[in-house]
Image: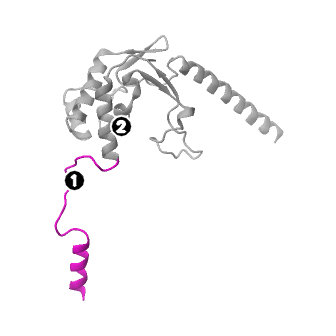
């Protein structure tokens, strides 16, 4: 048991050192590992624009602002033979992170996502508190202009709050309480 406790303590020490090192690296806007976002490549630990992928990113933002659904966006990109950063065809799930990626407006971000729980469960979209995140203004080259990015964020927020225009939001004359009233009368 003593050896297990010592191993656990050493593991925690190593974890703190690695985390401190990565935080220091992120504060200098250096890439901390993993696959860079669509539109970027990593050269000497810095994000640089991949021009062919940057065109895809710009078209994703334009398609979203034009009102296309995620599925229609994926279909159009796939028809052109374009692929995600991982080399896969686009799906309707490919756009959540792309449309929210602050690196596209030049803000280098790191340590944004909430860690998974011990059993591997967690919300992939949950974010850590701002004081735990690293954000460096001008830390990477900008692909999307600020105005376009802001319009997309407002549209995303509207959809999340249920205020965006949607074809599925229709008002039916016999909806809601009237239907329950009529059903109740027919039962009696």
Residue 175 highlighted magenta (yes or no): yes
Does residue 168 sit above or below 181 in this rendering? above
**Where residue 14 sits in the image (x, y, percent)?**
69, 27
| Pointer 1 or 2: first along the chain | 2
**Where residue 104 sits in the image (x, y, percent)?**
36, 24
- Residue drawn at (81%, 36%), measured in percent from left and top? 3
Quarter of the view holding residue 105: top left
- Residue drawn at (48%, 10%), measured in percent from left and top? 44
Q: Nearer the viewer, residue 4 or 24?
A: 24
Label 1 sits on a secondary structure element that is loop
Residue 64 highlighted magenta (yes or no): no
| Label drawn at residue 168 | 1
**Where residue 118 sits in the image (x, y, percent)?**
60, 45
Q: Which residue is situated farthest in the left direction here?
A: 173
- Residue drawn at (32%, 38%), measured in percent from left and top? 154
**Where residue 111 sits in the image (x, y, percent)?**
53, 30
The magenta stretch is 161-188
Q: Which residue is mark 2?
A: 96
Instruction: Name the front one of labels 1 and 2.
Output: 1
Q: Nearer the viewer, residue 32 or 156?
A: 156
Quarter of the view holding residue 100: top left
* Left or right, 59 with reference to 108: left
* Left or right, 182 with reference to 86: left
Image quadrant holding the C terminus, namely: bottom left
- Residue drawn at (52%, 22%), measured in percent from left and top? 32
Disc tally is 2
Query: How many residues crowd around disc 1 within 10 Å: few (fewer than 14), some, or many (20 or more)?
Result: few
Q: Nearer the viewer, residue 141 or 119?
A: 141
Query: How many residues crowd around disc 2 within 10 Å: few (fewer than 14), some, or many (20 or more)?
Result: few
Magenta stretch, overall SS: loop
């Amino acid at each position: 048991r003593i050896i297990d406790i010592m191993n656990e303590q050493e593991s925690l020490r190593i974890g703190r050192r690695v985390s401190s090192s990565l935080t220091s690296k992120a504060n200098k806007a250096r890439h901390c590992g993993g696959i860079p976002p669509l539109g970027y490549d990593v050269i000497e630990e810095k994000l640089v624009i991949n021009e062919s992928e940057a065109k895809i990113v710009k078209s994703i933002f334009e398609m979203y602002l034009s009102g296309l659904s995620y599925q229609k966006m994926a279909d159009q990109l796939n028809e052109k033979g374009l692929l995600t950063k991982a080399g896969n065809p686009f799906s309707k799930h490919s756009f959540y992170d792309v449309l929210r990626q602050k690196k596209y407006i030049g803000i280098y971000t790191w340590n944004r996502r909430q860690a998974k729980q011990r059993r591997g469960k967690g919300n992939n979209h949950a974010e850590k508190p701002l004081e735990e995140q690293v954000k460096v203004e001008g830390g990477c080259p900008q692909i999307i202009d600020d105005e376009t990015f802001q319009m997309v964020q407002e549209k995303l927020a509207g959809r999340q709050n249920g205020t965006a225009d949607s074809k599925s939001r229709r008002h039916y004359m016999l909806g809601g309480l009237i239907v329950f009233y009529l059903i109740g009368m027919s039962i009696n």
